[in-house]
Image: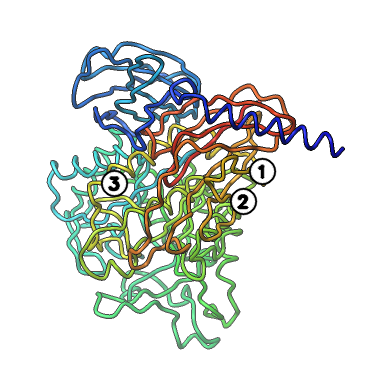
Amino acid sequence: MKLIKINNCFLVLIALLFLHCTKPEDTFNYTPEETQLVTEVVLKTDKTKYAPGETVTFSSDKMLSGFTVRYKHLNNVIKEEPMSGKTWTWTAPATDFKGYMIEIYKANDNVETIAGTIAVDVSSDWAKFPRYGFLSEFGNVSDAQINANLDFLKDFHINAIQYYDWLNKHHAPLKMNGNVPATSWVDIANRSISFNTVKNYIDKGHDKNIASMFYNLLYGTWNDYATDGVSPEWLIYNNNSHTNVNKHPLPGWLSDIYVTNPGNTNWQNYIFDKTTLVYNNLNFDGWHLDQLGDRGTVYDYNGNTVQINQTFTPFLKNLKTKFPSKKMVLNAVNQYGQSNILSAGVDIAYTEVWDPNNTYKSLADIIKDNNSLSNNQVNTVLAAYMNYDKANSAGFFNTPGVLFTDAVIFAFGGSHLELGEHMLAKEYFPNNNLQMSGELKKRLQKYYDFMVAYENILREGGTFNSPVLNSGDGQLNLKNWPPVASTVSVIGKSLANKQILHLINFSNTSNLNWRDTNGEQTAPAVKKNFTLSLANSNTVSKVWYASPDLDGGASKELTFTQVGSNLIFKVPSMQYWGMIVVEY
């Protein structure tokens, strides 16, 4: 046994020397000096997602002579054609729920230059791979601004939008003048809302295959509830003698929010009728329901204790019966009531994340918890507000903080509610004190391209595991998830005939708190041409690598060698996040 161990170590050493001595251009199809996409062309699609067989229209800001358009699913090339103009079309494949990466490239002496990339999602239903955005301003917005806002979201492949505080009153969301909608109203913060603005957003969004979800609480009224036909018997109380209504105070606004009992069928019938008015007049695709978290010990009008989370399931099931063709989503505030929510047939798992869930590990735990509670039937969206305290005044989002948070969320199969008319930093969505820098916008688009192109690896099942991965040349200090300061975190997942290895580079970060409250997270140093050794006993057919920080997420096949029980390969470059796929 001792002799075999020595021989294996010797063979591993020879393999490492081979990988170190091999020229990069002989081993990898990439331009070695690049650690990010060389922006030669900016590519766009006309829609955010496509039905199987639908025509995809691409546009480029410039024409590149001698370059090729390559269409790939994961690392498999399905078509190539010369780049022959600044616009062209492609018929989406007939298979539903697949992600694709389109690459503009040129090869010289076995070295590829990637000049542009863009992803395409072919999915008939946005809820399979939700990429959720928001809107929060509904005054007299011009058609040009509506188009610009939707184009911005389309360029990030946002496929559904939450219409935050578009409503009139929570217990009467659409203001009516007799039998027709009012032309305008004010929301609870006394902001002007235009019916036509809401309608135009919905209609123009549908033209880009973007769904629209109207926001409303499942259990809220204003203080004038009685004049609108809401009975005090439907409310929730802080005592058992119905003299102290449970409410959410909003100082200086038009009303506090008075909490109703979601389990009360009279309340359900009332709010469902008001929702019918919404659907009859606005072509919303569904209801994004909100709640206010754990209300403590509360009572119904008759003095009975109410476990509010236990009312979520019957409310949602009755809602689905009432509106079977409409989507429904209920925010699990810090996971409150999530098991009740996910047992009721909601279309996505949505969690608004608050303390004490303030670490990168917490984000991953919530996503995995949602997977378990839903039997892997729905995917997760996290409302996780970045640079929270920094957003108390004007400035810019901190790029490293945002990219690290999205790398963790995306690697574990979730998506991040963060993009609307502006980027999101507060639970009050109209707050727009912080702006995206040009660098953040450019880099974040590549992260969303990455999430779309590799959605069938990132968001379609699999089992997380703990691979034995070592740094063959000592460049990386590797530790399996959860993160440890000054290390590169390894996230393993087995999926069909693949072993997935995500590397997230926390090697010189300032902290491991995802919110990056004051915008102080630091950027990681780029790691180049590093050798890895994976404990492996299977016959490997292919090893490939992709990173949103390298060549726009274009996949690159890697040379590998199997020595004893070790699979050895070299990775070209990693900054924040890289993904290795070992195929058997």
Q: Nearer the viewer, residue 528 or 183?
A: 528
- In space, the residues marked 3 and 1 are separated at their CA atoms by 54 Å
Residue placed at 58% from the left, 53% from the top? 370
Picture quadrant where residue 25 is located = top left
Query: Who's the residue at 62% across and 27% down the image?
Result: 583
Q: How is the image coloured?
A: rainbow
Which disc, if any, is residue 467? 1
Q: Secondary structure at mark 1?
A: loop
Residue lying farthest to the right in this orientation: 1
Q: Which mark is residue 120?
A: none
Dots 3, 1 in contact, CB < 8 A: no
Query: In this rendering, which labeled residue sits more in front, label 3 or label 1?
Result: 1
Q: Is residue 109 above or below residue 492?
A: above
Residue annotated with mark 2: 480
Determine whether 392 is above or below 474 in the image. Answer: below
Q: Does label 2 or label 3 sit earlier along the sequence?
A: 3
**Number of the label disc, if any, that sits on residue 281:** 3
Secondary structure beneath label 3: helix
Q: Nearer the viewer, residue 52 or 306?
A: 52
The C terminus lies in quadrant: top right
Amino acid at pointer 1: Pro
Name the kind of residue labelled 2 in the image: Asn
Can residue 274 be seen in the rendering of this structure?
A: no
Location of residue 371 in the rendering, given as x and y in whole percent from the top left corner: 60, 49
Q: How far is disc 2 from disc 1 in space, using C-alphas?
A: 8 Å
Could you say whether the residue bearing mark 2 is in a helix, strand or loop? strand
Q: Position of residue 240 (x, y in %)?
A: 55, 86
Contact between labelled residues 1 and 2, with CB atoms less than 8 Å apart: yes
What is the three-letter code of the residue carrying label 3? Asn
Task: Characterize the local packing of mark 2: few (<14), some (14-19) or many (20 or more) Cα atoms within 10 angstroms.
Answer: some
Q: CA distance from mark 2 to mark 3?
A: 52 Å
